Amino acid sequence: MDIDSPTDDQSTDELAKLRALLRPPPIPGVQDWGIPAAPTHQPDPKLLEKLALFHSIKRRPANPQHFNDTLMANRDFRNPHIYANLVNWAGVSDERATNFPKELWDPHDVPPEWFADNIAEAQKRKAEKDSASQAPGKRSHINFASSSSSSHPRSGSNQDRHIADSAKKPRYAYYASNSSSSVTRDKGRTRWG
């Protein structure tokens, strides 16, 4: 037996500790986080038959098929009105329902300016106003931005600045030249002149 391999008891203890760490804290006044207990009655036999059929189709050794793949291959699923059909089939009466209390969020209390047609009208009005204000002869003035001028004059002569600039490192590194290379760099010139 390998000394480093954990025994079954050690792995079970470790798994129990991990489950205890991952278990969310209880909610005060709510039993099992509000999850209902398992039903005591037997499920519908027709439903069990359907599920057994889908499981057998999915686990066929020769040609396994998943329900979702079959659904995606179905021509009726590609119907552009499938959403409306599914909403009607499911019996959803209010598509904008919410689980939040009405005081916190009411999906039916939407300001009119949030609707797409009102937003489009507001954008159209703004565009017309902007184009009318930019029409020839309609401008009363044009705002210019001043250039950035230095208020501090440079100190020192041009020669001092040239010496300071030449002491700086170059902005890019030159290729390392071999001794056999005929290309040399002229120290006084750059490639731009």
Image (spheres, grey):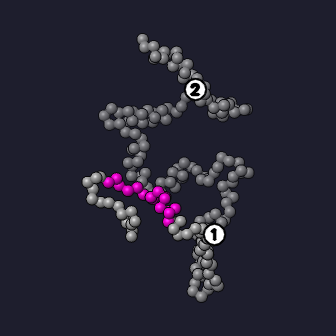
Residue at left 38%, top 48%? 73
| Residue 121 visible at all | no
In the rendered image of this protein, does residue 11 appear above or below residue 90? Answer: above
Say which of 52 and 179 sits in front: 179
Return the mark for residue 19.
2
Residue occupying the far left of the picture: 180
Residue flagged by tag 1: what amino acid is it?
His
Element under disc 2: helix
Provide residue 21's location: percent of width, then percent of height.
60, 27
Please tell me the numbered disc located at residue 152: 1
Q: Quadrant of residue 69?
A: top left
- Say which label, 1 or 2, has the lower sequence index: 2
> Of 191 and 67, which appears nearest the observer?
191
Q: Secondary structure at mark 1?
A: loop
Residue depicted at x 66% and y 33%: 33
Query: What is the count of numbered marks?
Result: 2
Tell us which disc is closer to us: 1 or 2. Answer: 1
Residue under the image location 58 percent in, 50 percent down = 92
Q: Which region of the structure is painted magenta? A: 162-177
Q: Say what amino acid the circle numbered 2 marks.
A: Arg
- Residue 175 located within the stretch drawn in magenta: yes
Is disc 1 surrounded by few (<14), some (14 to 19) or many (20+) residues within 10 Å? few
Work out which quarter of the rendered image holds the N terminus and state it: top left
Question: Horizontally, is 145 left or right of 190 in the view?
Answer: right
Asked if residue 172 lies in the magenta stretch, the reply is yes
Crowding at label 2, few (<14), some or many (≥20) Cα neighbours within 10 Å?
A: few
Name the residue located 62 percent from the left edge and 81 percent from the top edge: 142
Q: Is residue 110 visible?
A: yes
In this view of the protein, which residue sits in the foreground, 15 or 42? 15
Query: In the picture, which quadrant includes the C terminus?
Result: bottom left
- Expressed as whole percent of the image width and height from the top left, the position of residue 116 reads 59, 65
